[in-house]
Image (tube, rainbow, N blue to C red):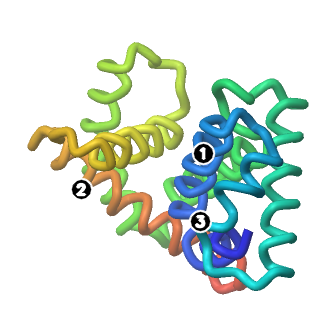
Amino acid sequence: MKIAKQLRDSNIAEYLLYMWQLEDTLRAYGCDADRLAADYVPRFDLTPDERRREAQWLADLCTMMREEGVAERGHLQMNRGTLAMLTDLHLQLLDSPKHPFYSAAYYKALPFIVELRSKSGRQNMPELENCFEALYGTMLLRLQQRPVSEATQEALTHISHMLALLADAWRKDKAGELEL
């Protein structure tokens, strides 16, 4: 909960990736709140009160995952909502003449996004979701110490740059500092 809040406030792209990873962690524990409280939460350096709040937050997320039918795959509505808000901002930035650097980063990343969409067979997937899935999938490969091709690394460089600009715009928008 603490990490999620910090990331949500500082870098929305990292927050979304963190939440996807947390969804997978909860799935690995079978969305079992008792197991999470006994085996997962103690891994963190938390006070007893923080531990109790973290365990409750994870239990609430498990409940949400079951209720929303994403206990086995998919994403929580709140994470899909975050992605939808990022998509709205993405489109606003592309339409705004005040953000040429974002548009340039997008058009540099676009050929890689198109290629990733083609390879995934999910052409109907929103572009930003495809970008986040590419980053998340690569993160999983690295955790498994599996190789990442040079072509994928190049694609991720452009996609990461675009998402970093988007996350910065999100932060500025939330602070009331973004002009569209």
Q: CA distance from mark 2 to mark 1?
A: 26 Å
**Residues at marks 1 and 3 touching, judged by CB atoms closer than 8 Å:** no
Give the image location of residue 10, x and y in percent: 59, 79
The mark nearer the N terminus, 2 or 3, is 3
- Could you say whether the residue bearing mark 3 is in a helix, strand or loop? helix
Q: Amino acid at mark 2?
A: Thr
Instruction: Indicate whether 124 appears above or below 153.
Output: above
Q: CA distance from mark 2 to mark 3?
A: 18 Å
Horizontally, is 60 left or right of 116 in the view?
A: right
Give the image location of residue 111, x and y in percent: 25, 36
Quadrant showing the C terminus: bottom right
Residue 180 visible here: no
Please state which of residues 178 and 127 is positioned toward the viewer in this rendering.
127
**Residues at marks 2 and 1 touching, judged by CB atoms closer than 8 Å:** no
- Could you say whether the residue bearing mark 1 is in a helix, strand or loop? helix
Horizontally, is 65 left or right of 18 in the view?
A: right
Q: Which residue is mark 2?
A: 157
Dot 3: few (<14), some (14–19), or many (≥20) neighbours within 10 Å? Answer: many
The mark nearer the N terminus, 2 or 1, is 1
Dot 2: few (<14), some (14–19), or many (≥20) neighbours within 10 Å? Answer: some
User: Quarter of the image holding residue 76?
Assistant: top right
Give the image location of residue 26, x and y in percent: 67, 43
Q: Which residue is mark 3?
A: 12
Please state which of residues 105 and 77 is positioned toward the viewer in this rendering.
77
Give the image location of residue 63, x and y in percent: 88, 40
Q: Amino acid at mark 3?
A: Ile
